[in-house]
Amino acid sequence: MFIRSAVGALCAGLIASSAVAAERIEFMFPAPVQGKLSREMQKLVKEFNSSQDGVEVVGVFTGSYDDTKVKSQAAAEAGKPPAVVLMSANFATELAMNDLIVPIKELAGDTDLDGLMQEFWPAVRPNAYFNGDVYSIPFQNSTPILYYNKEHFKEAGITKAPETWAEWVDAAKKLTKPEGERWGIMMPSNYDYNGWLVQALTMANGGQFYNNVYPGEIFYDHASTQGALKFWRDFAHQHKAMPTGVTNSKQVSTSFFSGKASMIVLSTGALTFVRENAKFDYDVAFMPRNIRNSVPIGGASLVSFKGTTDAQKKGAWEFISWLTSPEKIGHWSRFTGYFAPRQTAYDLPEMKKFTAEHPDALRAVEQLAYAGPWIATYNTVAVRKAVEDEMQALLSDPELTFREAAARAQKNADAVLAPYAEQTALTLK
Amino acid sequence: MNKPIRETPGSFRSARPYLLLLPAFLCLAAFTYWPMLQVLLASLSDKKRVGDSGTFVGVENYFRIFQDAHFLGALANNALYAAGTVIPSVLFGFLFALGLRETTNLSSILRSVLFFPTLVPLVGAAAVFIFVFMPDIGLLDYYLAKLGVSATNWLGNPDLALVSLMALTTWKNAGYYMLFFLAGLQGVPQDAEEAAKIEGANWLQRLYFVIIPMLGPTFAFVMVIALISAVSQIDHVIVMTDGGPNNSTSLLLYYIYQQAHEFYDLGKATAATVVTLIALLTLSFLSMRTVERKVHYET
């Protein structure tokens, strides 16, 4: 322990003595969709570094969203807090709660942050705030969206994309060919993606999924979530329109490209990936509804860990401002398929030109009118995993009932939330 | 010629062995014993995250993990996984060594081929095996389809995922264990085998009465390292399944990682670490004992 702090002091001393050079700051970023994204991100970092000489950003690729959270926390625990991290948008809440990240006002000096947030879509704002302060600046955002193979639709005699769950089931059944030759519908059920889609189905079923005011409550054992679990499970076991067991996002996209799946649900962040790999006529559509059109936000925002120097904070804000400027955020959106969380990006001429050529890029933006925040609670990953385990069990085990699964998910999630509830809602504040 | 100095207790002479041991001991103390002690202390506290101060809570964390279905599941998974990797990989390693005992051109090539998987990093092997196990379009399903077996969701089915991981581990380790057995076979004295031959023992009898007893120490050693690797390697779990589907491939080390780094529960993580260490030590001790009974040592 004391060795570590001695080394830290030594490093700090070295950095202080070499203040002639640019301020070095560390930037950790994930790439949950595909390898091309991390290369492009390094390019952006290079561009920023050569655009000025006060700050030098060191880009570090850190894998998946969940891995990025673990790695950045580990770095902070080791006394090397990263100045900028591209963090899954829903983790900012618990990181702020655990006092690991700083409110953005500590970086931004006298920038009017509430004014700045007005430039972002309303749907992405709730995940950025905690206790009335901005803790993260949205950078790449997404919603789940339905990709479908138009050629298969024509062949099956389906004229338009399904808009309701009933139409969705009907289309999936019609599109399926027996013996696993072709699946009507595939959705990723690996951890992280899984919870996001259970939330999407729950919201489309009229549900809240979690208490987005108080981060100590989750609604798994409620009709809206039960219905979502049942609906997804039935695709596999009852309608036989989806493979049983867990399929990850890679399997889902590969099956779509090879014509083994007619409809898939993926993030809009995969839009460019699909556009480049689908060698057939495809289109995207809103997530179908049962009670209402509603989807959760996904994607990632920029946060800054606690314990950096003032100079590093200043550098971090410079980089964050540059990265989230309408031009750069728009460029990233066109490159990836994520929608740009900053509305003003869509007023720029190059964005207007792009969306005219690729109307599918607008679908996610149109769906924003129906989007809500992403599950963010105390200990989010553990709470999320409680329902993901059950969803995976439902997809694998035809004997398991959705009621049993929902009840167990609730029980396990409540056990995770209990310590927080004890200290908050069950205590006189 | 000087007269030898009479040794007195406490002189440099008697301290010398300890001085020679000191560097190694200091390294071990700093990187093994001290952390072990820290883990033990943390397991008796209510620490949530690294850096917490935490207060002493006695053995509460141990009660908590033994009431945690996920921990018990990881324990059961790991026991299955250990049986399903140690037995086949040691057996294959032994059989490969027997078959490739004579040095010929062909056997040299085959030895290299069988040893090759050992050189592949586990993370890389796991990434490749994701594609081997891909349903329908993966390597495995491609060849099974030729035999008329329909697509199988190897890693997405809770009943098959762990078995798939066992197959990867066996593929990766058998060639490595083969090396130890090849070395062990070098040490089997020719005269013993020839004597058995002259006595009219057939190949199987020679194997059972001469070779296997002679390889006792090798078996003991290989079993122990195979057992330790069954508990200490989780790269493939992280790359291929993340412990899923529904925790069916969650092994002890993965559970520990998750509790410590994802769920902010250092108490559970450290208690599980202590339990894992005790289990490993016990198993190592037992396997050493059982195999040693059958060991033949040259006198």
Image (tube, grey):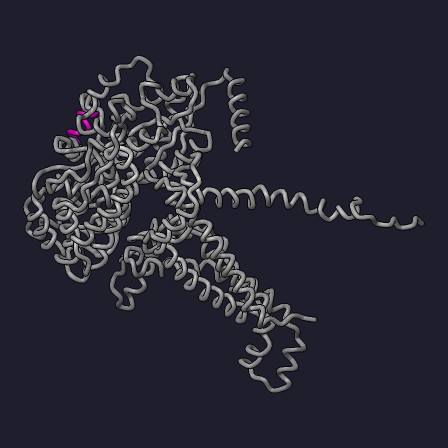
Measuring from the top left, give residue A416's x and y in whole percent.
Answer: 29, 42
**Any part of residue A328 in sight:** no
B234 and A36: which is toward the camera: B234
Quadrant (top left, top right, bottom left, bottom right) of the C terminus of chain A = top left
**Residue at x 51% of width, y 23% of height:** A12
Judged left or right of residue B13, residue A211 is: left
Measuring from the top left, give residue B50's x and y in whole percent.
Answer: 43, 36
Measuring from the top left, give residue B164's x and y in whole percent.
Answer: 36, 59
Measuring from the top left, give residue B97's x and y in whole percent.
Answer: 54, 68
Q: Is B59 rendered above or below residue A128?
A: below
The magenta-colored residue range is: A350-358
Q: Is A321 rendered above or below residue A263?
A: above
Quarter of the view holding residue A141: top left
Residue at the far front: name it: A428
A295 and B113: which is toward the camera: A295
**Residue at x 22% of width, y 41% of height:** A196
Q: Is A377 rendered above or below residue A260?
A: above
Residue at the far top: name it: A110
Quarter of the view holding residue A289: top left
**Residue at x 92% of width, y 48% of height:** B2
Q: How many marks?
A: 0
Quarter of the view holding residue A315: top left
**Any part of residue B120 in sight:** yes
Judged left or right of residue A93, residue B226 is: right
The answer to whether residue A78 is magenta is: no
B102 and B180: which is toward the camera: B180
Majority secondary structure in the magenta region: helix
Residue at the far right: name it: B1
Q: Is A392 rendered above or below residue A73?
A: below
